[in-house]
Image (cartoon, rainbow, N blue to C red):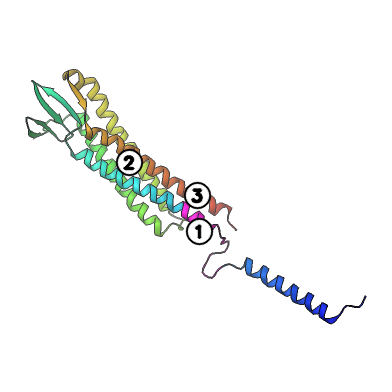
Amino acid sequence: MHRSPCRLAFKCTSHRETHRILLSSTKKPRGQPFGYSAAAPLYQLKMYSFMGGGLFCAIVGNILLVVSTATDYWMQYRLSGNYAHQGLWRYCMSNKCYMQTDSIAYWNATRAFMILSGMSCFAGIIAGIMSFSHFSSFERFNRSFAAGIMFFVSTFFVLLGMAIYTGVTVNFLGRRFGDWRFSWSYILGWVAMLMTFFAGIFYICAYRMCECRRGTGPR
């Protein structure tokens, strides 16, 4: 069957147009790595959301650790009819505060663990901030993973310190003072522990997201 030249020209034009559309749809944008897709911005948004939430929790947790460790309201009690309160470094009676000069093992242990927790959390914050600008360097050292581990180490240290203080206070000081209770500095310590724990969770989730993305990407 004879085909007209117009019909053949139209068909060739249609094939060239289809080929051009396919090439433009598969061509990666300039400056983007191979395997780039439209879903990448959404994935990055989720990843950075986890990192931002973790960094917020870590900063709040570190502030609470410093306030809890430095203030004098871990325990409140009555001694000889007078209201008193004490922290890790001082005890206060009749509106006067005095340094804790006695070297008591559980106090020293609690102080040491709280300080180590604050230092670990601060190191995690530094690594977490750096991971925003160097998130793609997996091969040797991943900063988001390091930040998550440092936050979990901080959680472990504060848990040890709080557990030691709670156990000794309940079993020893609670029997010595009839009318006593834990106060807000002590409560802030537990809240700080939760914040550092959630910071670690967020950063490990961000790390796992990027690891999964990297594992399923093109080789």
Q: Which residue matches tag 2?
A: 154
Choose top left, top right, bottom left or bottom right for residue 62. Answer: top left
Choose top left, top right, bottom left or bottom right for residue 186. Answer: top left
Mark 3–mark 1 distance (CA, rounded to whole Å)? 13 Å
User: If the image is split into quadrants, where does the C terminus sit?
Assistant: bottom right
Earlier residue among tags 3 and 1: 1
Q: Which residue matches tag 3?
A: 209
**Dot 1, how many residues are within 10 Å of its Cα: few (below 14), some (14-19), or many (20+)?**
few
Question: Which type of secondary structure does the marked residue at label 3 adopt?
Answer: helix
Relative image position of residue 180 (x, y in whole percent): 18, 23
**What amino acid is labelled 2 in the image?**
Ser
Is residue 30 shown in magenta? yes
Please state the extent of the stretch shown in magenta in the rendering: 29-46
Q: Which residue matches tag 1?
A: 41
Q: Nearer the viewer, residue 167 or 57?
A: 57
Please give the name of the residue rendered at 44% of the width and 45% of the height, measured from the top-left corner: 204
- Report the side of 96 relative to 166 (left or right): left
